Image (cartoon, rainbow, N blue to C red):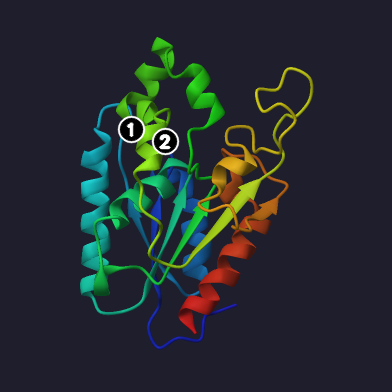
């Protein structure tokens, strides 16, 4: 369904850790076919500093805000957290109309705490992976200043030996870890973390949210 809008709503896509903009290609194509204008922000978590990536994403947000039209942001996993960090130093007309976060942790993920000290984890995920294991980092994040939607998965392992001790999860991030505030009500779908953005149910929910932004 084509969005009834004089100009397409711009949507910035920010991928997750260990991925590239290509991981959100199908979602971007779907949004474009639905009448939106997707744009991408890329980074390389293994070699770039967390703050360096945040600074570049803030630049993307500022540029979109300067165009004077409503825009939205979609972040997958670490991508959503990078956007949240970027928004903490922004205000006024540069802010997006809505932020959608898919499987984004807002407290130290259990897996980051467990594997953070190991050198393979450090090698693959760089400083960004270490930031995920720091409670102090999450504690200093201010509340989000824009409307947001959380999409979380619950198809992860909950059986015997699961690091999530029976808690619903998407295989990488526990449901409770996706909450920004205790009263949040995530959209929970039977999807796994890595490819949730390709699931038709996730894309349906994203379009439903963006339709309100475009209205």
Q: Is residue 120 left or right of residue 46?
A: right
Residue 26 seen from this side: yes
Q: Which residue is mark 1?
A: 45
Residue 60 vs 20, above or below: the answer is below
User: Residue 44 at what x, y percent from top left?
Assistant: 31, 34
User: Residue 127 at what x, y percent from top left?
Assistant: 30, 27
Residue pictured at 50% horizontal, 45% vertical: 104
Residue placed most toward the observer, 132 or 189: 132
Determine whether the residue tagged by mark 1 lies in a helix, strand or loop.
loop
Q: Which residue is mark 2?
A: 17
Residue pictured at 36% horizontal, 68% vertical: 96
Tag shown at residue 66: none
Residue 100 vs 112, above or below: the answer is below
Query: Which quadrant would residue 161 be assigned to in this image?
Result: top right
Residue pictured at 59% horizontal, 39% vertical: 193
Q: Is residue 26 left or right of residue 164?
A: left
Residue pictured at 21% horizontal, 40% vertical: 52
Q: Quadrant of the N terminus?
A: bottom right
User: Residue 212 at what x, y percent from top left?
Assistant: 53, 78
Residue placed most toward the observer, 10 or 33: 10
**Mark sitting earlier along the chain (1/2):** 2
Query: Which quadrant would residue 103 be assigned to in this image?
Result: top right
User: Residue 94 at what x, y percent from top left?
Assistant: 26, 69
């Amino acid at each position: 369904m084509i969005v009834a809008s004089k100009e397409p709503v711009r949507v910035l896509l920010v991928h997750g850790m260990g991925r590239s903009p290509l991981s959100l290609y199908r979602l971007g194509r779907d949004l474009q076919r639905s009448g939106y204008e997707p744009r991408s922000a890329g980074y390389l978590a293994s070699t770039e500093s967390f703050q360096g990536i945040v600074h570049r994403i803030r630049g993307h947000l500022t540029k979109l805000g300067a165009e004077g039209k409503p825009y939205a942001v979609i972040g997958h996993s670490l991508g959503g957290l990078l956007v949240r960090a970027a928004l903490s130093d922004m205000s006024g007309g540069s802010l997006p109309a809505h932020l959608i976060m898919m499987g984004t942790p807002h407290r130290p993920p259990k897996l980051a705490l467990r594997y953070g000290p190991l050198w393979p984890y450090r090698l693959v995920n760089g400083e960004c992976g270490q930031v995920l294991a720091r409670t102090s980092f999450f504690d200093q994040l201010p509340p989000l200043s824009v409307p947001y939607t959380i999409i979380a998965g619950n198809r992860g392992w909950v059986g015997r030996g699961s690091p999530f001790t029976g808690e619903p999860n998407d295989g990488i991030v526990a449901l409770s870890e996706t909450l920004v505030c205790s009263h949040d009500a995530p959209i929970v779908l039977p999807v796994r973390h890595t490819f949730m953005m390709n699931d038709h149910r996730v894309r349906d929910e994203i379009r439903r949210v963006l339709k309100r932004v475009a209205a």
